[in-house]
Every structure is written in structure tokens, then in C-alpha cells.
Amino acid sequence: MPGEAVQVIVRCRPLNKREKALECGTVVETFTDVGQVQLHKPGSDDPPKKFTFDGAYDQNSNSQMIYEDVGFPLIESVLEGYNGTIFAYGQTGCGKSFTMEGIPDPPEHRGLTPRSFEHIFQEVAVRENCKFLVRASYLEIYNENIRDLLGQDHNAKLDLKEHPDKGVYVKDLSEHVVSSTEEILRLMAAGSKNRSVGATLMNADSSRSHSIFTVWVEAAETIEGDEKLRASKLNLVDLAGSERQGKTGATGDRLKEATKINLSLSALGNVISALVDGKSKHIPYRDSKLTRLLQDSLGGNTKTLMVCALSPADNNYDETLSTLRYANRAKNIQNKAIINEDPKDALLRQYQEEIEQLKALLAGQLSPDQAAMLLSGLNHRRRHRCFRQCRH
């Protein structure tokens, strides 16, 4: 089966207050019409380094433009049964979280994440002959430890496991059924308050962890009397910023965090390099928790979009060049996404079966022994789901 390349776009923000105070020059030129970025080396007459991507957005761009170009078709694919991943990469303070989450006002600066949620629930509301079940989870990887941002104890360290059918998963990660855009946004806001952040010289509110917000979309569609079941998932990944400790002023806990961040991002880079090399027999997914969790998004059964955030400042030349090279390698990764039809463990199927069984119980079609077994099984499954979906 032919592969599908990871889609890569870059977004360059304006100079920030710190860079203006340092009287930084601009070294990044963005040519949106051809998806190209040119990087000029400060104090050099050498020709600029040129990089071409699936999209390039300058300081005048907004999240609405980006979503309409690349986010909308990806979410449409998720609703059709494909797995999808959007993740933001770049130096600390370059606008990764702004691109993913954005701000509510003005509306054109709402991020890719809330736009994705709105898109999903708009489709859930209007699609005919189709029943949906939407669930969500939210985790972070902090100092190589996985924490459930929506769990009863969000400081508990969770373990990674592997299953022959569902692949790599996080044991005991809570999942929450959601039924509207407002509900899922409240869920994400509650989890975001538990994220590990801290001030550095580069960013007063820097993310000190990688976060993954996952949305599962299960759909039962009736076509000419036959019911088809699809189950897909959308990973929204906000990576902690790559950084040089000297520039961020990191010491103590900040320094330890930065070391772990850079190690996991280095592992991600090694996975990308191995995937595009074509000669590597071993892909080092197991080198970090991040790469194991993103294993299916890089070289697997997922449509993946990478958004790389850039600073235009001349004093960030080295970091910007590194980000562009990183992104340039990633666009050569080939994934093999397929529609996930008729999944065996879809919760929507279980709910529908329970409804039919309860109808039979109410109609008196079951013997006393069958009724007792049915009620016992329903209670057991309900307790199990309540445990997985426990809230604060």
C-alpha cells in the first residue's frame, strides 16, 4: 500500500517585546504563495538557505487561515474513520501554544485545537443516519513521567503498556465522554491548569512538559439497512520548546526539566531521521515516552500534521535553522493511514448491545437466570467505565 507523507507547515511570528528591546534584526522571509521560507545568516552575504513545505505562514497570518488550509481536511478525515495527529514543534517562546490553543478574541486567532473540537461536534449534530460517541483524555510527559491531567490524582505516575491490537497505551489513563464543544473545552481547561509550566528568560509562562489531548470518535452509520462502525482518534500534541540552557537562564529544577525536554526531542529527531533514511532496520521509538506514544503518528496508521513555529529574530538564527532542518526531514516520513472500520472494542457497540438487551429484559423475553446474568454484566461494565471516566 502506498504511503502518505507527513504534512509539514511553518509559521513565523512577529518580533516580540524582548527581541525588540534587544534591537534584533529579522532573518526570516516567508513566501506563502509557494510555501517557502528563506533564512538569512546575520552579518553574511551568503545566499539565504531555502526550505519548501506544504505551507508557510508569515507574521500576518492567523489561525483561521491555517485551519482552513490544513486543519479542516485533517478533521474531515478523522470523522471518516482515519486516525489524525496535529503537533506543534519549535523553540521556546515561538508560538506553539498560541497556534494550538490561541485566544478567543479576536475570533480569527482561536487556535487549531478549539477549531477542531467545534468542527467535530458540528458534524456530529448534522450527520444523518449516524450515531456518535466522543471521548477525551489529557496527559502530560514531565521529566519522562506520564501524568493524567484529568485524573483524581494528577501527580500519580502512569505506566506505558503495549497491546497486540490497540498498540501502545497508558494504563489507568482516565477517559471522559463529552457531548459538546463547550464541554470538551471545559475539560481541556481543567487539565491545562494542572500542566507543568515555569518562567525562563525566553518565555514567562513556558511549557515544561509535552502534552497530548486525545479525542476518540466512534461512529455507527446505517447504510441501506446495514450498520457500519468506525473508530478513530485525534491526537493534539503541544511539545515543550527546544532550547539552549544558556539562553533560557535555566538553573536548578528548570535546568533538569530542560535536559529531559531536550533528550526527548532529540529522541524524536532520531526517530524522524531513521524513518526517512530508508536504510535503518531499527526505529528507536523506545528511547523516550514521547516517541512511544507518537509511534503510530510517525510511520504508522495516522494522518499527521506538523506545525513548526519560528522566531524571525537574528539572535535565534541557530535555533531557527535547527527547527527548519527538523521540519524538512519530517516531511519525508511516509505514513500508512487506513479507515478504522468495525473495531472490536468500540464502546459505542457495547452501549448499543446493552440497550437491546435492556429492551428484551423490559419486554419479558429473558428467563430469570438470563435477566440476573445480564444485570450483573451491565453493572460490572458500568463500574469499569465509571472508574476509567472518573472526574475531579
Image (cartoon, grey):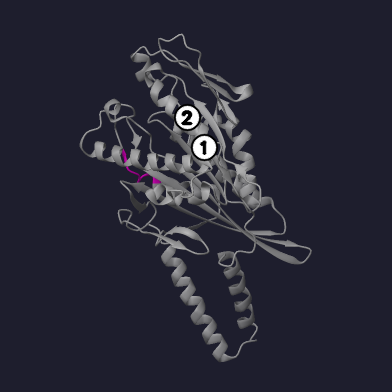
Q: Amino acid at mark 1?
A: Ala
Q: Position of residue 308 (x, y in %)?
A: 49, 32
**Secondary structure of residue under mark 1:** helix
Q: Is residue 365 left or right of residue 261?
A: right
Decide whether residue 195 is among the magenta residues: yes
Q: Which residues are magenta?
A: 192-197
Q: Position of residue 234 (x, y in %)?
A: 54, 49
Q: Residue at x 40, y 30 (%)?
A: 91
Q: Is residue 251 left or right of residue 52?
A: left
Is residue 219 positioned above or below 328 on the image?
below
The residue furthest right is 224
The residue furthest bottom is 368
Residue at mark 2: 325
Label 2 Cα neighbours within 10 Å, binned few <14 / some 14-19 / many ≥20: few
Q: Nearer the viewer, residue 369 or 312?
A: 312
Count of numbered badges drawn on the protein? 2
Q: Nearer the viewer, residue 263 or 128?
A: 263
Q: Position of residue 253 (x, y in %)?
A: 23, 39
**Secondary structure of residue under mark 2:** helix
Residue at mark 1: 330
Decide whether residue 360 is among the magenta residues: no
The alpha-carbon separation of the residues under discs 1 and 2 comes to: 9 Å
The answer to whether any part of residue 355 appears in the image is yes
The residue furthest left is 252
Are circles 1 and 2 on residues that touch, CB within 8 Å? no
Residue 240: image quadrant is top left
Label 1 Cα neighbours within 10 Å, binned few <14 / some 14-19 / many ≥20: many
Q: Residue at x 52, y 81 (%)?
A: 375
Is residue 62 positioned above or below 377 on the image?
above
Q: Amino acid at mark 2?
A: Arg
